[in-house]
């Protein structure tokens, strides 16, 4: 499934028409990992909300395989796109297995009863996300990182061709983050899914991404392969900070080094 955005404009302030997303024209192809980066307030989360249909553009359109996303029902959208949010909060003491199984709801009957295939998928995802030992616990009793993995598992259970990650690794330790990223790269390769992830960690994004997209004040400043767009000039333009870019042999990617001492 291909994603196209055509002349997308969106403003949270309709009175003053200040753009949160300004004239986005970008395409996402299957089988790639895209990272979205930029300073606070640059439009990263707003863009993901537009892709899910939670927000609607003031002008322009978003297409999935040349069809406007407004043409799809909520259930159809749930089979096409899954989101791992940075601030997902669960205040009801669901059992973890119940939360993860919620990812299968778009495929269940009217009474939301999982069948053998649903249970098989849930168990497989629990193993992938390393939450087997959490499945019988109440989600309200988990740590922030554990909860994030549960939410991640629920999204993976939707088995969608598009996965959106909004600072999805912010609460996880490095071991679980790398485990999930390795799994996503395998899915991208084997199933041709699209992953679009908001990052604040530029170096982490450089290691895992096929393409990087830099935003500032609601506009796309640069997009392309990390080797092409991760430059000190773009870092200066986007973040207004001086940096040095060097290739790191250990991680086989360009890495950014910032001046931290005078």
Image (cartoon, rainbow, N blue to C red):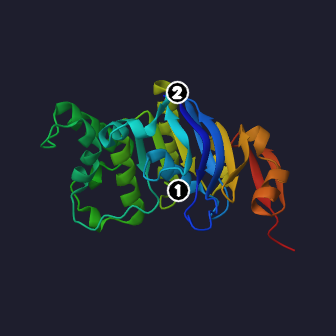
Residue count near mark 2 (Cα–Cα under 10 Å), binned few <14, some 14–19, many ≥20 = some
Q: In which quarter of the image is the C terminus?
A: bottom right
Residue count near mark 1 (Cα–Cα under 10 Å), binned few <14, some 14–19, many ≥20 = some
Label disc, if present, on residue 167 of the rendered structure: 1
Q: Nearer the viewer, residue 60 or 55?
A: 60
Q: Position of residue 221 (x, y in %)?
A: 74, 49
Q: Which residue is drawn at 17% across and 39% down?
A: 114
Q: Nearer the viewer, residue 57 or 189?
A: 57
Q: Residue furthest right?
A: 262
| Viewer-side label of 2, 1 | 1
Q: Which residue lies furthest to the front in this view?
A: 15
Is 261 placed above or below 67 here?
below
Q: What element carries label 1?
A: loop
Q: Where is residue 257 in the image (x, y as percent from the top left)?
A: 78, 57
Residue receiving disc 2: 189
Is 28 placed above or below 112 here?
above
Q: Which residue is drawn at 33% across and 50% down?
A: 131
**Does residue 253 appear in the picture of this structure?**
no
**Does residue 211 appear in the picture of this structure?**
yes
Horizontally, residue 76 falls left or right of residue 65, namely left
Disc on the earlier residue, 2 or 1? 1
Q: Which residue is drawn at 42% across and 40% down?
A: 70
Measure the alpha-carbon separation of dots 2 and 1. 22 Å
Q: Position of residue 169 (x, y in %)?
A: 50, 55
Q: Nearer the viewer, residue 67 or 209?
A: 67
Horizontally, residue 24 falls left or right of residue 93, namely right
Q: What element carries label 2?
A: helix
Q: Where is residue 137 in the image (x, y as percent from the top left)?
A: 23, 59
Quadrant of res 201: bottom right
Is 187 placed above or below 49 here?
above
Count the numbered circles shown. 2
Q: Which residue is drawn at 61% across and 34% down?
A: 27
């Amino acid at each position: 499934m291909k994603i196209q955005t055509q002349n997308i404009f969106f403003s949270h302030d309709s009175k003053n028409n200040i753009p949160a997303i300004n004239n986005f024209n970008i395409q996402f192809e299957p089988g790639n990992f895209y990272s979205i980066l930029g300073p606070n307030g640059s439009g990263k989360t707003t863009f993901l909300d537009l892709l899910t249909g939670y927000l609607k553009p003031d002008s322009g359109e978003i297409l999935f395989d040349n069809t406007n996303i407004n043409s799809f029902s909520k259930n159809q959208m749930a089979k096409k796109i899954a989101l791992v949010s940075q601030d997902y909060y669960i205040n009801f003491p669901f059992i973890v297995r119940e939360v993860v199984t919620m990812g299968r709801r778009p495929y269940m009957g009217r009474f939301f009863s999982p069948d053998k295939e649903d249970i098989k998928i849930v168990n497989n995802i629990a193993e992938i996300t390393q939450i087997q030992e959490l499945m019988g616990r109440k989600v309200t009793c988990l740590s922030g990182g554990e909860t994030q993995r549960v939410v991640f598992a629920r999204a993976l259970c939707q088995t969608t061709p598009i996965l959106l990650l909004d600072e999805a690794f912010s609460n996880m330790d490095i071991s679980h983050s790398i485990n999930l990223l390795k799994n996503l790269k395998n899915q991208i390769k084997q199933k041709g899914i699209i992953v679009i992830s908001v990052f604040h960690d530029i170096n982490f994004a450089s290691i895992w991404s096929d393409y990087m997209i830099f935003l500032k004040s609601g506009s796309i400043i640069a997009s392309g392969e990390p080797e092409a767009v991760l430059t000190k000039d773009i870092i200066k333009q986007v973040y207004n900070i001086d940096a040095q870019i060097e290739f790191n042999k250990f991680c086989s990617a360009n890495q950014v080094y910032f001046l931290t001492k005078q």
